[in-house]
Image (spheres, rainbow, N blue to C red):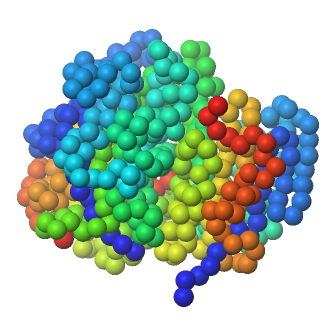
């Protein structure tokens, strides 16, 4: 019999608000990105000095993954399937600016969107399937289908999938943990419902 | 899981504007790498494989307006055009378009020309390709560092495996932009000479640019002599974002998982298409992973000496060359190899030779700690 999968928990980070499947867990009016990221880091009582060296996209990914993984025993084969609109453009622009004076190798390494998958893998010791997709707007169908293919083929027993976008200081994060443990059925409709809920400005080409 | 059949393919590179021209150049040992001077970007000269824009425009003018498209778009469009011209019955409403790239039109950051700012976006690049030919489905864009092109094929197989797609066109492409030249130079990763994969005197990569496309299907073609993808896996090192694992752990695990899915053992692999970037650490890591996988006696090559590192395109190009290696029963030499310079023994192909090839393994690794293994079978 085919196994069913569920969205066990999710996290959203947008406009200073951090929430999971149960409640708003942190709220701030801070508009400076690095101060906001640090505030969430402190709120979560993270002790991970590497965090401070990361670019914005990786910081967002680490914060989101931390919220999902801290109350859940992680399977080491949990796949990481993330997507966004802006790829790594936020850091690309910073690196591009640096070229004329001193091309920074520490910035250059973050000019790929999948680096955040590496950062999450290192922090949570996940030697697992990774993929980063780029699309104009939240593509629930692709996330659902690709996650399902990994889960049903046995390549992964659980999946962290979602949307992780950062451009011009605006961030839009929706990550969910897909597992055989019962909660909300894992479907394209439910992914859309969760992503668009209270999301006044979903990421898209404007 | 279902097999994925590799059908028509096209390669647009400094070695030529078709797969046939590319294979011929490799058979003759010609390289696309040439000495480049870009004093405004980096002080020292370096080798790279760059496509002459006038040649590209001369080829593109037959299918579209050269002013309306960026260099990368023209390369990708030409590659896709070649395949569609040979497959006129392909229903573009039903065919998935999968695009693999690391940086897309990143050169527009420095020199936007007349293109709107959103042309920098990878989703826009995908839409340009889709609209040009009339692909109805939203393109799937894979941007996963240097495994992107190979991961694109795996994505097609995985979505095909659950019945979501039947046919897909997998397209890969990246440019030698000032952006990546500056970046790899800041890493001190650019070789002063043409890159020398697995050699003792290797000291870094040569960059290259290319676009490539391959038609794949879960339906077995009626004709005989087909190559199918029968096992695939990616595993992250979880070790470092810009350096590979010293033990080759992620690559080793990828190989083991792909072989397991293919239900074959390492000694059945007749040919290994390595990543072989010619950085000190990458090639050393690969030797560890191959040795741990008992692949030290399997003939292997790196194609970076012909193309340079074409980033998001590389693993797709190398899969296409692997396909022809298998169909032609012809092993191609690993260009610029001198004396073995990794700590575990490997069997580097030093001269072209004929050999029956039934199973092949393609591997790739990249920044972010990603690794990929693909197992191909001849049927």
Image check: A85 left or right of B293? Answer: right
Q: Using the image, determine if residue B1 lies above or below residue A194.
A: below
| Percent x, y of residue B298 | 24, 64
Q: Using the image, determine if residue B137 lies above or below residue B235.
A: above
Quadrant (top left/top right/bottom left/bottom right) for the N terminus of chain B: bottom left
Residue positioned most to the bottom:
A1
Please name whichever residue, A48 or A144, is drawn nearer the observer in this view of the structure.
A144
Q: Using the image, determine if residue A176 lies above or below residue B105.
A: below
Residue positioned most to the top:
B40
| Percent x, y of residue B148 | 44, 48
Image check: B222 left or right of B309? Answer: left
Please name whichever residue, B33 or B326, is drawn nearer the observer in this view of the structure.
B326
Q: Residue placed at 11% from the left, 50% from the top?
A: B352
Marker count (numbered): 0
Q: Residue placed at 41% from the left, 37% from the top?
A: B131
Please name whichever residue, A21 or B250, is drawn nearer the observer in this view of the structure.
A21
Q: Residue placed at 18% from the left, 47% from the top?
A: B86
Quarter of image, res A186? bottom right
Quadrant (top left/top right/bottom left/bottom right) for the C terminus of chain B: bottom left
Image check: B299 left or right of A134? Answer: left
Determine if residue B67 is in view.
yes
| Percent x, y of residue B288 | 40, 60
| Percent x, y of residue A20 | 82, 59
Q: Residue placed at 48% from the left, 74% from the top?
A: A153
Determine if residue B296 is in view.
no
Please name whichever residue, A126 or B96, is drawn nearer the observer in this view of the structure.
B96
């Amino acid at each position: 019999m085919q196994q069913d999968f569920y969205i066990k928990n999710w996290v959203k980070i947008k406009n200073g608000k951090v929430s999971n499947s149960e409640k708003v867990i942190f709220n701030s009016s801070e508009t400076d990105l690095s101060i906001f990221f640090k505030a969430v880091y402190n709120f979560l009582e993270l002790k991970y000095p590497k965090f401070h060296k990361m670019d914005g996209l990786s910081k967002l990914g680490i914060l989101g993954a931390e919220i999902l993984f801290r109350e859940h025993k992680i399977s080491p084969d949990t796949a990481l399937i993330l997507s966004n609109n802006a790829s790594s453009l936020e850091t690309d622009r910073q690196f591009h600016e640096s070229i004329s004076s001193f091309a920074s190798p520490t910035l250059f390494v973050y000019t790929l969107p999948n680096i955040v998958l590496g950062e999450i893998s290192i922090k949570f010791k996940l030697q697992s399937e990774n993929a980063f997709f780029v699309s104009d707007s939240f593509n629930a169908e692709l996330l659902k289908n690709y996650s399902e293919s990994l889960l049903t083929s046995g390549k992964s027993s659980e999946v962290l999938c979602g949307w992780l976008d950062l451009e011009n200081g605006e961030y839009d994060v929706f990550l969910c943990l897909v597992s055989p443990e019962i909660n909300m059925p894992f479907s394209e409709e439910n992914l859309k419902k969760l992503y668009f809920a209270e999301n006044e400005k979903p990421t898209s080409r404007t | 899981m279902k097999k994925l059949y590799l059908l028509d393919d096209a390669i647009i590179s400094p070695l030529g504007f078709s797969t046939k021209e590319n294979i011929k150049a490799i058979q003759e040992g010609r390289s696309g790498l040439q000495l480049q001077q870009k004093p405004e970007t980096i002080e020292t000269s370096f080798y790279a494989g760059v496509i002459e824009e006038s040649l590209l425009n001369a080829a593109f003018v037959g299918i579209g307006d050269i002013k309306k498209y960026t260099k990368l778009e023209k390369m990708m469009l030409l590659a896709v055009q070649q395949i569609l011209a040979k497959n006129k019955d392909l229903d573009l409403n039903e065919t998935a378009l999968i695009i693999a790239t690391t940086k897309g039109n990143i050169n527009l950051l420095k020199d936007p020309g007349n293109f709107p700012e959103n042309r920098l976006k990878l989703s826009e690049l995908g839409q340009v390709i889709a609209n040009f030919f009339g692909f109805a489905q939203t393109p799937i864009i894979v941007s996963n560092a240097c495994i992107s092109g190979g991961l694109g094929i795996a994505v097609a197989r995985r979505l095909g495996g659950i019945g979501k797609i039947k046919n897909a066109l997998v397209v890969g492409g990246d440019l030698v932009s000032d952006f990546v030249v500056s970046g790899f130079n800041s890493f001190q990763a650019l070789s002063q000479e043409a890159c020398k994969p697995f050699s003792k005197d290797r000291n870094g990569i040569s960059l290259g640019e290319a676009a490539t496309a391959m038609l794949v299907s879960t339906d077995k073609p009626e004709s005989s002599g087909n190559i199918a993808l029968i096992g695939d896996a990616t595993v992250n090192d979880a070790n470092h974002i810009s350096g590979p694992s010293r033990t080759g752990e992620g690559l080793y695990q990828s190989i083991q998982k792909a072989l397991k899915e293919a239900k074959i053992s390492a000694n059945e692999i007749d040919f290994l298409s390595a990543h072989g970037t010619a950085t000190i650490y990458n090639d050393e890591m690969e030797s560890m992973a191959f040795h741990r996988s008992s692949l030290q006696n399997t003939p292997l090559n790196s194609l970076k000496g012909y193309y340079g590192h074409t980033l998001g395109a590389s693993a797709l190009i190398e899969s296409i060359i692997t396909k022809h290696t298998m169909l032609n029963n012809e092993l191609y030499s690993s260009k610029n190899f001198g004396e073995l310079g990794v700590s575990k023994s490997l069997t580097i192909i030093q001269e072209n030779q004929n050999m029956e090839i039934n199973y092949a393994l393609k591997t790739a690794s990249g920044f972010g700690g990603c690794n990929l293994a693909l197992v191909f079978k001849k049927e």
